[in-house]
Image: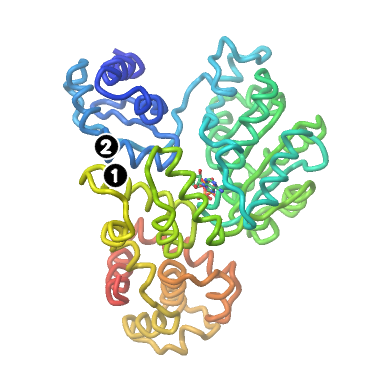
Amino acid sequence: MSDEDLWAQCVRWLEGELADRDVHTWIRPLQPVLNRDRLTLLAPNRMVQERVRQEFLELIRRAVRVNGGRDLNEIEIAVGAAEQKPLLNGQSQAEAPISGASDEVAVMSSGRLNPDYTFENFIEGKSNSHARAAAQHVVETPGGAYNPLLIYGSSGLGKTHLMHSVGNAVLQGNPRARVVYIGAEQWMNEFTAAIRHGRMDGFKNLYRSIDALLIDDIHFFAHKERTQEEFFHTFNALIDGRKQIVLTSDRYPKDIDGVDERLKSRFTWGLSVAVEPPDLETRVAILLAKADQNQVRLPKEVAMFVAQRVRSNVRELEGALLRLSASSRLRGEPLTTEFARSTLKDMLAAYERMVTIDNIKRTVANYYNIRVTDLNSPRRTRSLARPRQVAMALAKELTQHSLPEIGEAFGKDHTTVLHACRKIAELRDTDVKYREDYEILQRQLGF
Ligand SMILES: Nc1ncnc2c1ncn2[C@@H]1O[C@H](COP(=O)(O)OP(=O)(O)OP(=O)(O)O)[C@@H](O)[C@H]1O
């Protein structure tokens, strides 16, 4: 049985067990990928992933067992989009209006547009109104003055959401429009696969024949010269053809090291708009709206309580809401401020604990047996540079300070801090020693 068949059967079985709304909201968006004895269900975003894990995984296991998937050892829920042939706008290949296409389609595997990411459920506030207005303008006049539209800002602030909203709205106006959403990393993977399989013509034709290209996280192109070169051509062809391009990035392009100047300047040809962390009022509005969408009864004072404490990004707000709704349902208790205080105790403690950069410097210096002043010195020897990067990464993770503020505290600029955070994240992933060091330091700092 193919993964699709097995999963289709499971979904039918789950329809008998769950409310229609749950099937529609949580089960149908999952895409199955079967790999030997492991079934991976891909959720379109973390909210769906967590909800499915917490509430439906056991039932899904049962569904798989009774529908012929007995031999599966493992079922996991991950975030992503399956590699697949039906690409454009999520249509099937037969429907997709591509000319001369089988070769072209085969080299392309963009993610789908997430139908939940629309302008209607994007909550507007001071922090994002400019970006939202620009995105809406693009829908009204695609390929016009705002081309490309570049939305930049830190993680979890709604850049991807806005980008999908553009795609969904363009399609609503013209269901035959060829809209492609793809992450920069995936674009690079497709490009390298096309080279490897001798399918560059198909790749080029495809990306140059679409109506709107939405590319997420273009900072990923940094230091990937060949990818940049190819993207440069795609970019020019689309702009020349007055096709719309929307890009997102975690920084303003000028601040991305390792991207060719010609490309950087093109990224800012149209309009570049920032999204900022939402203010209190917007955070409350977002919580109330998300609660409403998920049929969670969230009193306004509880939303206020959470929004005052969870400040950095929308994804974390969503996480807090998810925890609250799951536990209140599980325990059958109403969602009061007291309930929120006890359920989110760990999360809030982390927010409320006062960790200062000075404190971090002292702890790190002590741990690595160096002086605090060494952390501030411009010397680049490895024995000082690494502890400095660790201290910067800890400051970013454990305090509410911005990158420029942290940079200033170490006599560096914000790009150095960003680089440090990336480097340490990578080392923690690949090197057990760094992982342990970092965890010990976190504990010493009270986390
Ligand atoms: N203004 C908003 N209104 C409603 N939901 C929002 C808003 N901003 C962000 N979100 C939600 O927060 C979550 C994170 O947003 P999104 O993935 O778009 O962030 P991002 O800026 O692209 O982050 P990253 O750079 O990490 O990909 C999503 O579930 C999104 O729907």
Query: Above or below — where is 73 with respect to 360?
Result: above
**What x and y, as percent, mark residue 247?**
65, 44
Whole-number angstrom distance, CA of label 2 to CA of label 1: 8 Å
Crowdedness of circle 1 by 10 Å Cα count: few (<14), some, many (20+)?
A: some
Residue type at the position of mark 1:
Ala
> Split into 4 quadrants, where in the image is the C terminus?
bottom left
- Element at label 1: helix
Instruction: Tell me the quarter of the picture where residue 90 sits.
Output: top right
Secondary element under disc 2, as helix, strand or loop, is helix
Looking at the rendered image, the disc whose residue lies closer to the viewer, 2 or 1, is 1
Above or below residue 317? Residue 22 is above
Among numbered discs 2 and 1, the one appearing first in the sequence:
2
Question: Whole-percent x and y of residue 167?
Answer: 63, 32
In the rendered image of this protein, does residue 33 appear above or below residue 440? above
Q: Nearer the viewer, residue 21 or 408?
A: 21
Q: Amino acid at mark 2?
A: Glu
Which residue is the extreme one toward the top?
94
Residue at 60% across, 58% down:
276
Q: Which residue is mark 1?
A: 326
Q: Which residue is mark 2?
A: 55
Q: Report which quarter residue 117 is drawn in.
A: top right
